[in-house]
Image: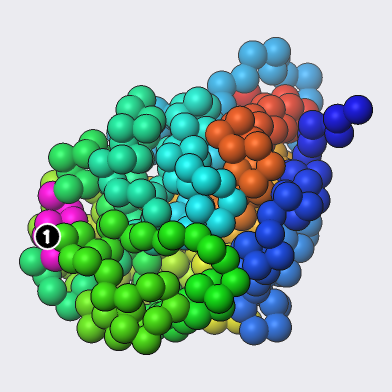
Amino acid sequence: MSAATPTTLAEFEASARQKATAFAWSYLSRPGEDGQTHTDNRRAFKRYRLIPRNLRDVYIRDTSVTILGTKLDFPVAIAPTATHLLFHPEAELTTARGAASMNTLMVLSSWSHHSLKQVAEAAPRGVRWFYMLFYRDRGRMKRLLERAERAGYAAIVLTADQPFFTFSFRKVATTLPLDFRFPNIYLDDNPPGPLGSLELAEYFKKTVKEAATWEDVEWVKKNTRLPVVLKGILSVDDAKMAVRLGIDAILVSNHGGRQLDGVPATIDVLPDIVGAVGGEAEVYLDGGVRTGTDVLKALALGARCVFIGRPALWGLAYNGAEGVQQVLKILKDELSLAMARAGKYI
């Protein structure tokens, strides 16, 4: 007798843990340092309360949202996450299909096993953004921006909260017999060595620009026709700077607690960021979203859309594209029900 299909994200997490390899699960679940921020991301949602408005006609609810000019069926999207190959043999191709089946968007990571073009071809009706690294060679960045535009990506995402990379893949190489490729990083280069090698680590060190600055963000904004989203903003001052540079959207994020530990939960700083932006850029949130009620709380505090990272990979590990679709559907259905119970119908 087969096990019942998970009906909550908590159940998907438990099921995915059984299916994923020990290394894959350790990589996915790893918090930063002591895990303070990772834990607080979840707990913070529970500190907020919804006050319902009753006796309203909520028989029909509209969960759709328009972000950067694109209409989605509901305000939950997939954040950029690396190396989906750890969780499914078709990696990001499968994740993209799951997102497209629910008419929501996926942000493709630079650390993807498949190229911009391959992912676009796998889910041609899907909505896709591209998370691009900062590079020392701006010619490389320009080529990537042009590839994203040609492949139909609708926005460029830049990460503000990761000034340094460890480039430590040795454990992957010695643990898993997987052929990792990063075609959105190598471009026309050949990898100088296998994953985990000193040669590859040196390649990344020479190629990727660490400690990027506002000037790098401004350069990207001036060199693409696509909207630019800045991910990893937690401070009001940074939000205001982003607006001054003409950034189109801000993703309030602490990298799932995997970067600087001890920073605030994203839901706690969201209202201040929304106030600082003053409607001059769209504001989104990720970090700790696990239920439809969480989504509604973020929307009530000013977020236009929320993004999920780990839960999408739980779905991927559980059952490929269908698993990703199921995770998204759970959040959509829970959001719709929460809207009805709170008297929120638009």
Percent position of residue 92, x then y = 45, 45
Relative to 66, is 148 on the left or the right?
Answer: left
Span shown in magenta:
140-146
Where is 332 relative to 130, above or below?
above
Work out which quarter of the rendered image holds the C terminus and state it. Answer: top right
Percent position of residue 130, x then y = 32, 51
Where is 247 relative to 344, above or below?
below
Is residue 230 something one can see in this rendering?
no
Percent position of residue 22, x then y = 71, 65
Where is 266 relative to 263, above or below?
above
**What residue appears at the point 52 percent right and 27 percent down from the top-left corner?**
102
Q: Main secondary structure of the magenta part?
A: helix
Where is 113 relative to 141, above or below?
above
**What residue appears at the point 31 percent right and 83 percent down from the top-left corner?**
199
Percent position of residue 112, x then y = 39, 55
Residue that label 1 marks: 142
Is residue 5 something one can see in this rendering?
yes
**What residue appears at the point 59 percent right and 37 percent down from the top-left corner?**
320
Image quadrant assignment for residue 152: top left
The residue positioned farthest toward the front in the image shown = 177
Q: Nearer the viewer, residue 72 or 134?
A: 134
Which amino acid type is shown beneath numbered disc 1? Lys
Relative to 343, is 140 on the left or the right?
Answer: left
Q: Nearer the viewer, residue 334 or 130?
A: 130
Image colouring:
rainbow
